[in-house]
Image (cartoon, rainbow, N blue to C red):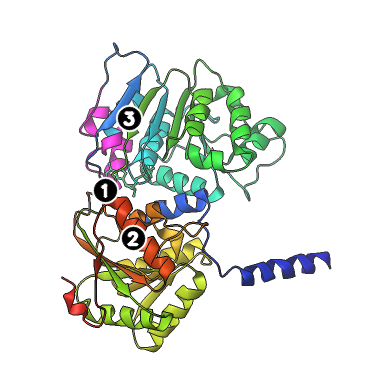
Amino acid sequence: SSETKELESKDKDKDKDDGADGPMSPAEKSLLQKIIHKGLVESTKDLEIQRKDPSSPLYSVKSFELLHLKPELLKGVYAMGFNAPSKIQETALPTLLADPPQNMIAQSQSGTGKTAAFVLAMLSRVNVDKNYPQVLCLSPTYELAIQTGEVAAKMSQFCPEIKIKYAVRGEEVPRGSKISDHIIIGTPGKVLDWALKYRFFDLSKISVFVLDEADVMIATQGHQDQCIRIHKMLPKSSCQMMFFSATYEPEVMEFAEIIVSNPLIIRLMREEESLDNIKQYYVKCRSVEEKYVAITNIYSVISIGQAIIFCHTRRTAGWLAEKMTKDGHRVAILSGDLTVEQRIAVLDRFRAGLEKVLITTNVLARGIDVAQVTIVVNFDLPMDQNRKADCETYLHRIGRTGRFGKSGIAINLVDSEESALICQEIERHFNKKIHYLDAEDPDEIE
Ligand code: ADP
């Protein structure tokens, strides 16, 4: 019954955990981003391109026709609703499809079209006359591998002869047999097992190697070493190496240098969030009840758009949601104890306007691209572990990127000396006035 004991102690921890809602794991975050970004993230930023040999011409294309894809693949691309290449695809695709093959490192935020780019390259390189794996794509988790595989399946819907195999938990291959599929998409541990332990396929015959979500890979214990072990078995001179990441930290680049020699490096800067067209207010409250009154006063004047309310703990978020619901308001709640599927369902409903208010903890400070949100309320001001102002989180909660452009309103509820100081520190940090608002008279909100 040691198992029961372990369960009990876990549950106790859970009870205790009404404190600050922790961040999601990088893999979870990445998956959620993938699922909630239904369309392309457009960027006004320029691409930064680095290459070892600047004398060789660099192509870029404004249409998919110019890539001279197999007609069935082009049909697949259009069937997915893609009309023209995204910013990163314009430059990545000609290089990824060129002969002789070139290596690439590409970095851009999630939703900018990286997956679609390398999947198209993977599918284009398959020789269907050869019945063995030629393309290998590593993803950090089961779920992310499936996401990539689904893109590949859709894009190759008119090329039924291309076969794709998942190397993930739950997938089995009979002992002693060989895999005849052309493309393997999987997690590093399973791929290592299949290639080295069971010899289900031959890594020396791989001609395209894709390392997806490299930054998440690094963040996952043991994955980096497994990737390097796999990489060691690939034919260095004849295998095209592609490396994709949403971030560009030094560890990511060190990893990239091990995997990819002589690459073309493409980076698309993230659009910076700013407070430029946000009106910021603070409301003085003496207690949590007064905060509640302030919220309901504000709620009563929101006639257009939607609001997001940030709380510091799951407990406060739950309390607030319950109280507002009892008072007849339609609110949604999003916190760290929900599964990914539940979070998506909550966000889908909110996006569809079924609820006007979303109450959340820190889980999604960045990445809720809900353009119609006009009011952001900090029920609790964001602070770090030392209870100091967390200006970065403030910016992610309130800030808008150029692509939303719309103006918004931020309201900070201040209920103590401490939170007043945090509010002042935020004001100083951004050098932007946070105006006093009388919550009894919320008509002041412009
Ligand atoms: P990333 O891998 O950078 O996160 P994805 O390749 O998953 O980006 O693309 C993000 C979203 O944009 C997906 O929903 C995808 O179907 C869509 N998308 C990708 N490329 C295009 C394109 N050229 N035109 C329209 N939509 C696209």
Kind of residue sitting beneath label 2: Gln
Mark 1 against mark 3, which lies toward the viewer?
3
| Disc 2 target residue | 424
Distance from Cα at disc 1 to Cα at disc 3: 19 Å
**Tag 3: residue type?**
Ala
* Numbered disc in front, either 3 or 2: 2
Q: Secondary structure at mark 3?
A: helix
CA neighbours of label 2 inside 10 A, class few (<14), some (14 to 19), many (20+): some
Upstream in sequence: badge 3 or badge 2: 3
Position of residue 420 relative to residue 366, above or below, is below
What is the CA distance from the residue labelled 1 to the residue labelled 2? 48 Å
Task: Give yes or no for residue 331 being in the magenta stretch.
Answer: no
Q: Picture coordinates of residue 89 (x, y %)?
A: 30, 34
Read off the magenta span.
Answer: 59-88
Q: Quadrant of the N terminus?
A: bottom right
Name the quarter showing ligand 1. Answer: top left
Mark 3 crowd level (few <14, some 14–19, many ≥20, 10 Å Cα): many
Q: Which residue is mark 3?
A: 92
Q: Residue visible at 71% across and 33% down? A: 197
Distance from the alpha carbon under mark 3 to that under mark 2: 45 Å
Label 1, on which residue? 81
Q: Identify which residue, 67 or 223, lies in the foreground.
A: 223
Sort mark 1 into few (<14), some (14-19) or many (20+) by Cα contacts within 10 Å.
few
Q: Is mark 1 within 8 Å of ligand 1?
A: yes
The relative height of residue 212 versus residue 7 in the rendered view (above or below) is above
Residue at figure coordinates x 73%, y 70% from the top left: 8
> Is the shortest distance between ligand 1 and the CB of mark 2 under 8 Å?
no
